[in-house]
Image (cartoon, grey):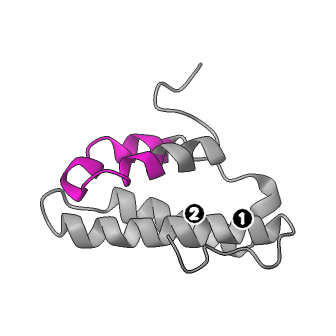
């Protein structure tokens, strides 16, 4: 059965990132739905990617709406950035990074 909120690893990360591209008050509604479909590939078990995926899940699911929306959204965006760089490094791009202009 297809998950109506997305299912996969990169797919779910992308959907979560789309939420947090919005202003903080608009980012939170529905973001947790995409965490449910977030599947860690076996390749990344025991790596920093797994640690950051777990951290991302916690930050999104444990957020209390209306409380520290802006600060928590900033932390989620920071975690997403760390996660995608860690994925690139695990895939063999040793010098992966965002650069100085974001």
Residue occupying the point 42% across, 66% down: 77
Query: How far from the left and from the top, in percent, is residue 16?
Result: 45, 49
Q: Disc 2 or 1, which lies upstream in sequence?
A: 2
Front-most of residues 33 and 74: 74
Q: Which residue is mark 1?
A: 87
Residue 28 appears anywhere in the view: no
Figure check: 7 above or below 77: above
Does 21 appear in magenta? yes
Residue occupying the point 12% across, 59% down: 66
Q: Which residue is mark 2?
A: 53
Task: Tell me the SS state at disc 2.
Answer: helix
Task: Tell me the SS state at disc 1.
Answer: helix
Image position of 102 (left or right of 70): right
For residue 74, what is the image quadrant? bottom left
Few, some or many C-alpha atoms within 10 Å of disc 1 (few <14, some 14-19, many ≥20)? some
Front-most of residues 16 and 52: 16
Which region of the structure is painted magenta?
16-36
For residue 48, what is the image quadrant? bottom right
Query: How far from the left and from the top, in percent, is residue 81?
Result: 54, 68
Image position of 69 (left or right of 91): left
Task: Give me the C-alpha separation between circle 2 and circle 1.
Answer: 10 Å
Residue 95 appears anywhere in the view: yes
């Amino acid at each position: 059965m297809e998950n109506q909120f997305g299912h996969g690893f990169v797919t779910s990360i992308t959907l979560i990132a789309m939420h947090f591209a919005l202003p903080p008050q608009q980012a939170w509604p529905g973001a947790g739905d995409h965490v449910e479909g977030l599947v860690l590939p076996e390749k990344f078990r025991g790596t920093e990617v797994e640690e950051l995926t777990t951290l991302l899940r916690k930050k999104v699911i444990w957020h209390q709406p209306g409380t520290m929306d802006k600060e928590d959204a900033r932390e989620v965006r920071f975690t997403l950035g760390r996660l995608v760089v860690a994925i690139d490094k695990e895939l063999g791009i040793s010098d992966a990074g965002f650069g100085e202009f974001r």
